[in-house]
Image (cartoon, grey):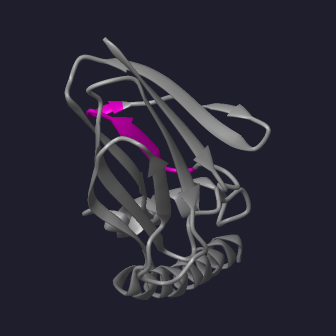
């Protein structure tokens, strides 16, 4: 068994998912940095860091409308990802021997690289990008209009019932 140490630097908060070899990893936070230590038998480990928005699912409209109603018309809203930011990093790292990697967050550039991986082991970068999803922004706009219409219908129905 070899050890794989991953250190994440420059992240304000690590939202989204981190998986190593298809298993979710729980990270420890120490002084603004996130760490994880794993043991593996494989020659290469696949690391995935992924964050998306709620508009990717098939039933995005129904889910958002349901959350809007449950949150009492947005009063107790959870604050979804309004910017529709997608962050996707996938790479393989050689684990023939004990490996340590520092994963540094890059400044945001729409369509640019999200992280820089610093290690002495061999890396195979599959994808490394962050961008604003334009289709999701349109869906967000549609959802905002639907929320206003839904609130107006409910207010109208309540006033008609009270009269």
Quadrant that contains the N terminus: top left
Image side of residue 22 versus residue 18, left or right: left
As displayed, is residue 155 above or below residue 102? below
Residue at left offset 20%, top offset 24%: 42
Residue at left offset 39%, top offset 87%: 134
Q: Quadrant of residue 74?
A: bottom right
The residue closer to the viewer here, 58 or 90, is: 90
Percent from the top left, x then y, of residue 33?
Answer: 69, 42
Percent from the top left, x then y, of residue 135?
Answer: 34, 85
Residue at left offset 60%, top offset 77%: 151
Looking at this rendering, what residue extends furthest in the top direction?
A: 1
As displayed, is residue 38 above or below residue 123? above
Percent from the top left, x then y, of residue 35?
Answer: 59, 33
The magenta segment is: 15-23
Image side of residue 23 versus residue 163, left or right: left
Looking at this rendering, what residue extends furthest in the front direction?
A: 120
Any magenta on residue 21?
yes
As displayed, is residue 149 above or below residue 90? below
């Amino acid at each position: 068994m070899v050890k794989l140490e991953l250190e994440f630097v420059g992240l304000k908060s690590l939202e989204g998912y981190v998986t190593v070899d298809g298993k979710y990893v729980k990270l420890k936070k120490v002084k603004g940095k996130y760490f994880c230590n794993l043991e593996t038998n494989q020659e290469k480990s696949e690391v995935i860091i992924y964050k998306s928005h709620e508009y990717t699912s098939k039933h995005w409209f129904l889910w958002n409308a349901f959350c809007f109603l449950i949150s009492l018309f947005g009063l107790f809203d959870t604050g979804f990802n309004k910017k529709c930011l997608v962050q996707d990093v996938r790479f393989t790292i050689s684990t023939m021997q004990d490996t340590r990697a520092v994963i540094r967050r890059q400044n945001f550039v729409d369509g640019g690289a999200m992280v820089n991986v610093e290690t002495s082991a061999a890396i195979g970068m599959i994808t490394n990008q962050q961008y604003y999803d334009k289709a999701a922004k349109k869906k967000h706009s549609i959802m905002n209009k639907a929320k206003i219409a839904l609130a107006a219908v409910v207010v109208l129905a309540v006033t008609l019932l009270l009269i």
